[in-house]
Amino acid sequence: MENQTITVNNGVNIEALLGAREALTAAPEAAQFKWRANSEWVNGTHTRSSVEKFFGLGEEQSHRQTFIYDTDHPEIFASEDKGATPVEMVLVGLSGCLGAGIATVAQNRGIQIRSVKTTLEAGMDLAGILGIDGDVRNGFDGIRVQYEIDADATEDEIRAVVAQSQKRSAVYDIITNPTDVWVDVRKSS
Amino acid sequence: MENQTITVNNGVNIEALLGAREALTAAPEAAQFKWRANSEWVNGTHTRSSVEKFFGLGEEQSHRQTFIYDTDHPEIFASEDKGATPVEMVLVGLSGCLGAGIATVAQNRGIQIRSVKTTLEAGMDLAGILGIDGDVRNGFDGIRVQYEIDADATEDEIRAVVAQSQKRSAVYDIITNPTDVWVDVRKSS
């Protein structure tokens, strides 16, 4: 086992994460993060959002660069298709969150990951957002995530890694449980 | 009012959307959509997702291009910061969905929108995802969305537009209500 642990490299710095867990256990206020995005409406259903600053470890933090994301509706909705739809962005977030967890949990368990391929599919009945049927929800009727994972482990061990990733995933939690959203509106000129 | 309606142009084709609502009321199976993303793990906490195909109006559909999104963790988590964090992607999706709704509802109400500036902020206690405290959730403790909207309307009318956008938003629904996620894992080689 020791040899295996030494040679496993999923690109995750487990020592740093375990150190962070220890440090944040001792200083819980440093664990209070604030994640942000800023957006400007461009035209029609097209919005441009930027992600750069966040707060954590007791102070303002910044990504190495500003990330810009366009969202829009596709042409079949009479839109210009300048980016993924907002609901597809949620799938991107879910996949990224579970994927980071899989690499991290596997590293912690001494399992070398070779590849992770994921397909996500979410059904939606447009009768909700179009106001056709008040009994149909606006959002997804569920999300199916299918993993094909090549790793130095049994299928059961791989399943256990994925399950632990779900258990610790922020986006999985946000999607599967209710989160409050407070909206404040000010007229500008 | 008729003059106002004629001159309002938020870049939203309301006639097409009202036509779609009528058509999908008559043919409910065409309203069944499936949204998708495909991802590959790159290294560490870095995942690359692509968005291109979806299903709707009874057949396979495609965006005009494949949209590629990288997600990662920032450097303070010992990661390489190759993209926004997955939770920030959720904020991008929420903002894009509400923004599309605001332009659409305003168009339908004959309200010219001049600008929409949005700041989103979501708190998260890392004691959840780091496994420090089992009583702390992994996801956001809530999301604050602040709008500054310049539009040809009173502040109350603008607030009503935003409220209606929330009422019809898919991502707002996904975040504020529970959505099932089914995960299937297969070992590949």
Image: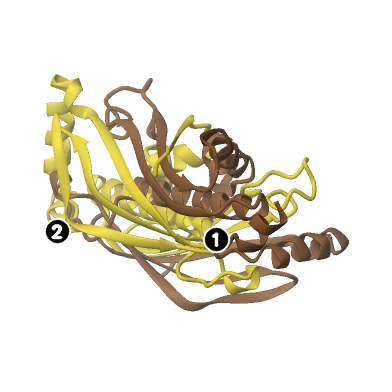
Chain colours: A yellow, B brown
Q: Chain of mark 2?
A: A
Q: Classify mark 1: residues with Cα within 10 Å, few (<14), some (14-19) or many (20+).
A: many
In the image, is A77 to the left or to the right of B24?
left
Which residue lies most toward the right here?
B26
Which one is nearer the viewer's eye here, A160 or B52? B52
Q: Amino acid at mark 1?
A: Asn
Q: Secondary structure at mark 1?
A: loop
Instruction: Name the residue: 40% across, 37% down.
Output: B146
Q: Chain of mark 1?
A: B
Instruction: Name the residue: 59% across, 74% down.
Output: A75
Q: Position of residue B17 (x, y in %)?
A: 70, 63
Which residue lies most toward the bottom here?
B64
Q: Amino acid at mark 2?
A: Thr
Q: Secondary structure at mark 2?
A: helix
Name the mark on residue B10. Answer: 1
Residue under label 2, please give it.
Answer: A7
In the image, is A15 to the left or to the right of B65?
left
Q: Quadrant of residue A32?
A: top left
Q: Classify mark 2: residues with Cα within 10 Å, few (<14), some (14-19) or many (20+).
A: few
Pointers 1 and 2 within a single chain? no
